[in-house]
Amino acid sequence: MGLQTVVARLKGTFYRPLFNQYRVEGVRDYNNIVYDESNRKVCRLDVYRKTLLGNLPVFIFLHGGMSVGLGRQHRKGFCRYIASKGCAVLNLEYGTAPKEPFPAQIRQILSALQWAENNAEKYGFNMNNTIMGGDGTGAFLAVACCSALTDEAYAAALGITTDCKPLRGLACFCGMYDIPFALSKSNEIAKQSAFVYALTGIDVFKEETLKNSPFYRAYCPLDYIHSDFPPVFFSHSIDDKVYPGQAERLLKTLTSAQIPYWEFCALESRSKHIWNMELAKNEAKACNDAFGDFIKAACGTGVMTARYDI
């Protein structure tokens, strides 16, 4: 076990209680469900939903932090909180490189969508109202998966075919969206190396190896966003030192493609990266409550809005 892996696991042990300290009454958990029998060890999910409601909108959530040892167990508190807003939340685990390099994760996510379709009656899913989202790495994968569902060229670039239903919305919390852009800044290469390796299995310091990857163009799913893309909710801060400039890249793309969006920006310097997961903080609650409103709007039961600053 390498030093980087040890450090990642230690960080993951620290973050688990921090992100799960908030409890939500009236939400039932269905834990450790296999969604792809071909990879039972990795492909598991948890379902969270209120027990007394009927068929609910579905939120497919993809955790971030793959490069620092985080997994779906670190997002239980957040998923329960969103479920309390009146949707069923599927909290996915997915594979990492080098064993399962990108785009293996996209195939797994699509398998989870198919699992949800097949089990909609059992768990009370309204698959006509499905939203996908994630934080950090998970936000990248959510944008990539949505691009594969709306753009045939991107799906072909990934070697993927799917007949999954279109999504009603997308949610991105402090995400990475454009890997080549991040690596174009010399001062960012070392910082992003762990993320890129965990996703692709490629050492960013071997520049030719990265650029010669058959999926290099797919490392920027923003290039494939067009008018068929669904509305987007995204949160960020003015001082995100983990993925600087990425929210601006996303905003520019959405504006250019005329995609409706909700933007939630944290202006305080102490709110930096994935701040909406710290559920005891007022800004996190405000952001996640706004996302609950976005779900209703995207599913046709609310009104679209624009931007929040806190």
Image: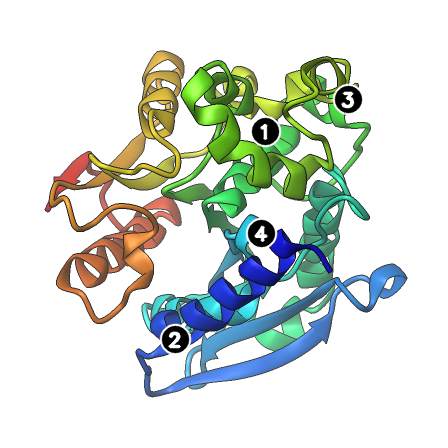
Which residue appears at 21% of the width and 63% of the height?
285
Q: Amino acid at mark 4?
A: Met
Image quadrant in which you'd find residue 264: top left
Q: Are marks 2 and 4 in contact (CB under 8 Å)?
A: no
Q: Are marks 4 and 3 in contact (CB under 8 Å)?
A: no
Residue 184 x, y percent position in the rendering = 49, 14
Q: Earlier in the sequence, mark 3 or mark 1?
A: 1
Residue 301 in view of the camera:
no
Dot 1, crowdedness within 10 Å: few (<14), some or many (≥20)? Answer: many
Image quadrant in which you'd find residue 52: bottom left
| The N terminus, quarter of image | bottom right
Which residue is disc 2 drawn over?
20
Which residue appears at 48% of the width and 17% of the height?
181
- Marking on residue 66: 4
* Distance CA(mark 3)–CA(mark 1): 11 Å
Position of residue 29 relative to residue 206, above or below, is below
Residue 44 x, y percent position in the rendering = 70, 67
- Which callout, 2 or 4, points to the residue nearer the camera? 4
Total number of numbered discs in the rendering: 4
* Distance CA(mark 1)–CA(mark 2): 31 Å
Q: Amino acid at mark 2?
A: Asn
* Distance CA(mark 3)–CA(mark 2): 38 Å
Which residue is disc 1 drawn over?
147
In the foreground, 12 or 284: 12
In the foreground, 72 or 299: 72
- Marking on residue 202: none
Q: Earlier in the sequence, mark 4 or mark 3?
A: 4
Q: Amino acid at mark 3?
A: Ala
- Which callout, 4 or 3, points to the residue nearer the camera? 4
Residue 64 x, y percent position in the rendering = 50, 51
Which residue appears at 42% of the width and 68% of the height?
15
